[in-house]
Amino acid sequence: MPTPPAAHPAAADMYRFLTDPPRFLFFTGKGGVGKTSIACATAVHLADQGKRVLLVSTDPASNVGQVFGCQIGHTITAIPDLPGLSALEIDPEAAAKAYRERIIGPVRGLLPEREIASITEQLSGSCTTEVASFDEFTALLTDESLVRGYDQVVFDTAPTGHTIRLLQLPGDWSEFLDAGKGDASCLGPLAGLDKQRTTYASAVAALQDPQWTRLVLVARAQAGAVNEIARTKAELDLIGIHASNVVINAVLPENVTDEPLAAAVRLREQQTLDFLPPSLAALPLDLLDLKPMNVMGLASLRALLSSDALACDGLSTVHLDAVDRPLCDLIDEIEADGHGLVMCMGKGGVGKTTIAAAIAIALAERGHPVHLTTTDPAAHLEQTLDGRIDNLRVTRIDPLQATQEYRDHVMATKGATLDHAGRANLAEDLLSPCTEEVAVFRQFSAVIREGRKDFVIVDTAPTGHTLLLIDAAGSYHRDMVRQMGATIDFKTPMMMLQDPTLTKVVLVTLPEQTPVLEASILQADLERAGIHPWAWVVNGSVAAAHPTSTFLRMRAASEAGPIEEIRQRADRLALVPLQEAEPTGNAALLRIASMTVAPT
């Protein structure tokens, strides 16, 4: 393991990821780890050194404009009060919308509306957004005339390995799709690419060249976030793009141990740092201290990369309302129905597995038959639970197995009539995240029906886009409606998910801006599929833990904005306090399920 850097560097120059930076700097990692803050702070630091810097965000949950307190859009905008720094926010949704129109526009009015709707939904997933965003910022990597005036270009988020693999596909995408040879789950978005292959090849070459590009992996000192960037590194290594640095953000300062909660969090983070995956431990590592408040404005951005404390003008608090309920209140409502399907959904690292397991154990302890299952490839229910519980059955839908079975089926059927190039394109398409979700849904459908008589708790489930993609493709739902007729009482899996008397979707998030924004995007995605979230759960709330130390009380105050935003969106809101110890084991999960949250 490399020697850790000094815990409190005096200046940003001491950080390894900022030493002799190349032309392009990319920051990547899961949502909520602080990529945007670090990218912005890096851009400010470079501008303070006299460099001309362009900061570019391609994150769908971008809040760069909010960080700087100004309006930033799709055109390059100078940042006030800091000569030399400009910023650009590539709106992924706007890019994807324009991208879809380039594909659909020419056939609108020529094809039936049902087919147009099907194509639209096929182009509404995350893969389309990724490819469209990459299409937008490729010019910044390859067209010198666009960046000639800048010494450094700093990117908030980087393209995934899957997106780049798609762009490297051989053959003619449009010809492949026009011939009806492929399922457009993720290959479909490629039909709208206008640029030449040589342009994308040049962009990928720039990403692969350490003389031009530095890729920085950002995480927090939490096992889930660290494992996520380890997976990202492995995925990018496969295509010759090698991460060069690791930044662990928001580490609780060593001197903040003046109450049991702070001391416990510090110990938990240190244990994560002591056991980094070997692939990450081999890279230069920097630790950034957690700041007592949100990083907003030039002063706080400069403080993020220094040991200087942020000045605080008094101590505010977040007020917990009576509507902010404990998890046990939601469990009481779930129990009242006597049965049902509960789906805990959210982005990675927010605690979906913990919340799902806590609900399941609580219901089982009350004497109800409960089936707890997960569709999350990164979930480890066996590590969350620590023994058998009466009335509780635990299973796992293996995404790898389900996906492989689905790929084999598609290659044996649709791929049987294709030539070598066509089979290669189809095989690459079937490597997409969309394929995995569709494959998992095939097995998930059997689990759904159990909710008609028992409690079924699901840790993650297909997104709204995947459900609509299945339905728009003429799947089981429409087939059953057509075959059985409206007068026959039946429930397809899709209908059960849309029925609030049978299915309760619980969105799990953290009391921070980016996770809340990502959960809001997920809510909109589900709403398009006719599924309205039943409740939100805010996990790991410092405010709900009622800390006594000044530092943690300031952190609690920073939760006020995100929690208020959730109150405006949620029919029900439950808060789960930040725990002193990792919430693993049956006793810890039962404690979470029974904790109360006192209003302030």
Image (cartoon, grey):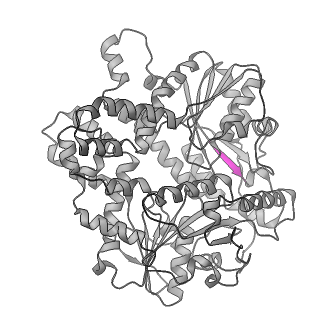
Q: Is residue 504 magenta?
A: no
Location of residue 428 in the rendering, given as x and y in whole percent from the top left corner: 35, 46
Q: Is residue 481 above or below residue 274?
A: above
Q: Quadrant of residue 366?
A: top right
Q: Is residue 545 above or below residue 39?
A: above
Q: Is residue 538 magenta?
A: yes
Q: Is residue 272 above or below residue 13?
A: above
Location of residue 11 in the rendering, given as x and y in whole percent from the top left corner: 66, 84
Closer-to-camera residue (240/545): 240
Magenta stretch: give its range: 537-541
Residue 165 in the figure: left or right of residue 80: left
Residue at the far bottom in the pictured view? 50
Location of residue 98 in the rendering, given as x and y in whole percent from the top left corner: 27, 55
Residue 74 in sight from this viewpoint: no
Magenta stretch: helix, strand or loop mostly:
strand
Residue 310 in sight from this viewpoint: yes
Location of residue 330 in the rendering, given as x and y in whole percent from the top left corner: 68, 33
- Residue that appears at 25% across and 66% down: 198
Q: Is residue 398 above or below residue 74?
A: above
Residue at the far top in the pictured view? 488
